[in-house]
Amino acid sequence: MTPETNNWLTGGRVHHRLADRIRAQISVGEYPPGSALPSESTLAAYYRLARSTVRRSLAVLADEDLIITLPGKGRVVNGPEGEPRAAYRYQAIANELRAQIGTGTLATGAKLPSELALCKQYGASRNTVRQALDELKDEGLIMSRHGRGHFVQTVRD
């Protein structure tokens, strides 16, 4: 949230006005796809509103499919229409690698970066990267060779 000189919201139908503000913040990239919104209590304190009002605002955004609620993560900004939704970090990593395979950036037989390199690239833990790789293996897009790494198996049509 960017500091504002007057972050008070007053008047009728305040929850729609708060939804408009959050929607604007999403559209300018303050909350990019996949990022978590501040908690209800944080938003309530910042805008000096009741949590029930904030909850109603967030429900408006959820109805518009701008945000989704994920257990343990809170409310997360959805990606653009047509882009696969990534509920968890490993899915976002798998989606990006899948896209690279689909466009030919990673061609059939190409070696994927090491797990450590992927961890650094995505700022993720080794377990998260392994989950992403396992998803691609389950789809038949990559294969593992013990001691050698992960390789593109086939390009999906």
Image (spheres, grey):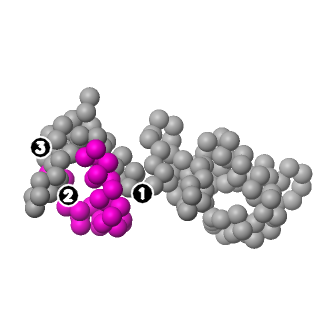
Answer with mark 1 or mark 3, whichever residue precedes in sequence.
Answer: 1
Percent from the top left, x then y, of residue 126? 30, 66
| Picture residue at 31% right of the left edge, 42% below the top | 99
- Gap in angstroms between the C-alphas marked 1 and 3: 26 Å
Magenta region, main secondary structure: helix
Q: Along the polypeptide, which appears first: circle 1 or circle 2? A: 1
Query: Where does label 1 land, which residue?
Result: 89
Identify the residue under disc 2.
Answer: 113
User: With 99 as the anchor, is 2 left or right in this view?
Assistant: right
Q: Amino acid at mark 3?
A: Gly
Q: Secondary structure at mark 2?
A: loop
Please identify the quadrant where the N terminus is shown: bottom right
Is residue 120 shown above or below 112?
Answer: below
What is the x, y in percent for residue 148? Answer: 10, 58
Percent position (x, y) of residue 26?
A: 59, 52
Q: Residue under circle 3?
A: 109
Q: Is residue 68 left or right of residue 148?
A: right
Seen from the viewer's position, the closer of residues 7 and 132 is 132
Q: Nearer the viewer, mark 1 or mark 2?
A: 1
Front residue (pair 147, 108) = 147
**Which percent across, then down, holds residue 18?**
75, 54
**Which stretch appears magenta?**
111-138
Q: Is residue 72 above or below residue 110?
A: below
Q: Image check: 150 left or right of 98?
A: left
Q: Is residue 40 magenta?
A: no
